[in-house]
Image (spheres, helix red, strand yellow):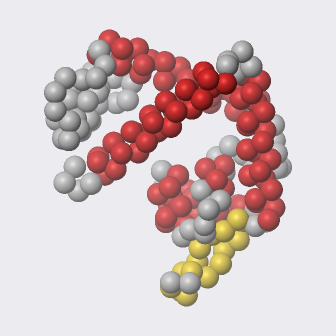
Amino acid sequence: MQPLDSPTAGPGTNPGTWSDPGTAGPLAADPATTVQLGEELIRLVKLLVAMRQYAPALHPAVDSTHYPALFNLVKDPKRVSDLAGCVHADVSTVSRQVTHLVKHGLAAKVPDPDDRRAHRVTLTEEGRAVIERVTNSRGAWLATVMADWSEHDTLTFLAHVSRFADSLEAAKARLERPDG
């Protein structure tokens, strides 16, 4: 499989990996455009990672590695194995994170109603408060970063980012299917 930052990676370049079997015909975008987009996405990810050091500590026991697990517990409790799938990490890593979050009162293990031998992880009230603080802090930071953007530009960017994330999820699901 081609790496994400490979100039040749893209739909149709390697049948069975990046090609979309449901798509026929020419690419929607010029290959030079998608190469440039790949470069900008890599730059964006690197900048986002670099900016983590400036993020305010909103809870002394929570670092940036814990947020994916916390945010994936907002809607409903999950088994550790399901949570690992949601955050795209291995079960042992997520299990250690959950143990840390439980130890610090941000999450709790509750009996699984479908299987009393198993447990699900749920947010505590303190965990929900951390999520709310993170969400508000991130929103304020983005407002500052995008202060010179119009509401229309911001909404357009939001729509495109959402669509791109949906496309990535769909591509991942296709690649994970056994018939691939």
Q: Is residue 77 visible?
A: yes
* Residue located 70% across and 65% down the image: 123
Answer left or right for 152 relative to 10.
right
Query: In the rendering, at what x and y percent does residue 34 appear?
Result: 35, 19
**Residue 97 seen anywhere in this rendered image of the structure:** no
Q: Position of residue 62 (x, y in %)?
A: 75, 50
Foreground pick, 134 / 167: 167
Residue 126 is situated, as x and y percent measured from the top left of the image, at 81, 61
Q: Going 71% across and 61% down the picture, which residue do you hit?
A: 101
- Image-quadrant location for residue 27: top left
**Left or right: 104 with respect to 99?**
right
- Residue 75's x, y, as percent? 62, 62
Q: Vertical placement of 1 versus 91: above or below? A: above
Instruction: Compare residues 122 and 157 and report the one nearer the observer.
Output: 157
As drawn, is 38 to the left or to the right of 7?
Answer: right
Can you say whether 148 is above or below 73 in the image?
Answer: above
Q: Residue at x 67, y 18 (%)?
A: 149
